[in-house]
Image (cartoon, coloured by chain):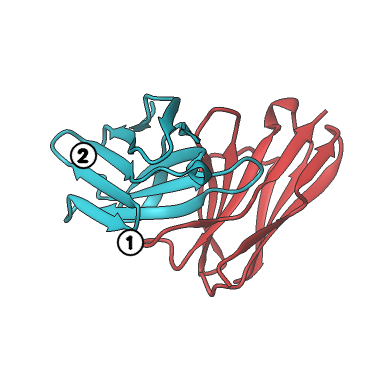
Chain colours: A red, B cyan
Amino acid sequence: DTEVTQTPKHLVMGMTNKKSLKCEQHMGHRAMYWYKQKAKKPPELMFVYSYEKLSINESVPSRFSPECPNSSLLNLHLHALQPEDSALYLCASSQVETGYNEQFFGPGTRLTVL
Amino acid sequence: DQQVKQNSPSLSVQEGRISILNCDYTNSMFDYFLWYKKYPAEGPTFLISISSIKDKNEDGRFTVFLNKSAKHLSLHIVPSQPGDSAVYFCAASVAGNQFYFGTGTSLTVIP
């Protein structure tokens, strides 16, 4: 199984809503990542989890709250988002955080904030 | 400031011909590079990698060339097929820590 899955595929939420994005992998990878991608822009790293511990937080606003319940799961909790947070949110995983190994991406969640 | 640049937003190539996608970087410490392919409504799919100890890596129809002195890498696809039509991203890192992505090049292979 070389797949990273993400749910939901699409999400529309208001600025007062609370929602969560979910990511799952069963490749035994110990590093998991959240990226944000706006149209015609490269993916931007948001968070890195290494061995279920938060390793990198790229100065992301607190309205985004990551969680790694176990080595296969990664969540992104959303609260009080702004319209400019509308983007494609990509999850990725790799064997470990460092070292010469590639990241595998999920299909993404297309988020629209009204 | 963008550390990885793909200056061609789009490229069209006839089926059977060579596609050459280019990527430039500014950080001389980058030593590990990846190419990804992305179809609409899907996540990026890993294609091929190269580390700075090599100047070339091949995998089937895909070859990546690295010119460290010019801080430039390129992806060659030979022969190009219509199914190769997608957006291609290059990414660079120092020893696999935190990848920086280019803005992508949209490749169209014309049958």
Residue B104 pos. (x, y %):
46, 33
**What chain does badge 2 belong to?**
B
Identity, as a three-letter code, of the amino acid under mark 1 = Tyr
**Residue ID for mark 2:** B28
| Secondary structure under the numbered disc 1 in the rendered image | loop
Specify the quadrant of the image occupied by residue A15. top right
Q: How far apart are marks 1 and 2 (CA)?
A: 17 Å
Task: Check the image and report above or below for B10 versus A50.
Answer: above
Q: Is residue A52 left or right of residue B21?
A: right
Task: Check the image and report above or below for B89 versus A26.
Answer: above
- Badge 1 crowding class, 10 Å Cα cut-off, few under 14, some 14 to 19, many 20 or more, is many
Q: Which residue is drawn at 54% across and 39% down?
A: A59
Task: Check the image and report above or below for B47 versus A17.
Answer: below
Identity, as a three-letter code, of the amino acid under mark 2 = Ser
Q: Which sits in the foreground, A30 or A27? A: A27
- Badge 2 crowding class, 10 Å Cα cut-off, few under 14, some 14 to 19, many 20 or more, is few
Q: Which residue is drawn at 63% across and 37% down?
A: A61
Callouts 1 and 2 in the same chain? no
Residue A53 pos. (x, y %):
55, 64
